[in-house]
Amino acid sequence: MKKTVLTFGAISGVVLSAMMLATVPFMDSIGFERGAIIGYTSMILAFLLIYFGVRSYRDNVAGGTVGFGRAFSVGALIACLASLFYVATWQVIYFKFTPDFLSKYQAYALEKAQASGDSDEAIARKKADMDAFAVRYRNPAFNAAVTFMEPLPVALVVALVSAGVLSRRRKDPERRAFDRAPNPAQPPG
């Protein structure tokens, strides 16, 4: 299981990291809304490797059958490893290359709130909340935790679906014959 998880988790993580590295430098021209669409689309594409990882585990390690729990475990581990790649890449990008990312996002969010007609009080509360978040976000541990929670729910949904689609139990021919045989303790009919 370890080899499957490491292989597919690393490939998925590299895809996530490559897409982030390709898009973040152009965030000013892409915009935050399109950036989110591109980001989550690339996550889904990268997390398709969870399906192939679980299938590889089922076919090559588990002898062609795997239960739902084991299939989900393999998928969840691949998801966690890929998400760790995502976090590591974001930590480097954020702290080394784009430390002003959050202030740009705050300006965008406040501008959007103002354009949608929010009251001055609501905008002031939102700004205060965002300022408090920005202070916490400078802490690398908090930053990593928040960033880890960004791709993980998407990945776990893919792992759940993959486990549901790919899990299958071995059919024991003796067990099936036993189930069909009449019970001698019960009278027929």
Image (cartoon, helix red, strand yellow):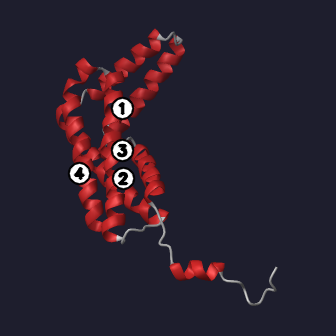
Give the x, y percent position of residue 94.
Answer: 24, 36
Q: Marks 2/3: CA distance?
A: 30 Å
Visible residue check, residue 95: no
Q: Marks 4/2: CA distance?
A: 13 Å
In this rendered view, identify the residue nearer to me: 170 or 6: 170
Q: Residue at x 41, y 17 (%)?
A: 110
Q: In the image, 73: left or right of 186?
A: left
Give the x, y percent position of residue 138.
Answer: 30, 37
Q: Which residue is mark 2?
A: 51
Whether residue 176 is situated above or below residue 67 in the rendered picture: below
Q: Earlier in the sequence, mark 4 or mark 1?
A: 4
Give the x, y percent position of residue 89.
Answer: 22, 43
Name the amino acid type tagged 2: Tyr
Q: Which residue is mark 4?
A: 11
Give the x, y percent position of residue 63.
Answer: 36, 72
Of marks 4 and 2, the one in the foreground: 2
Q: Which residue is mark 1?
A: 134
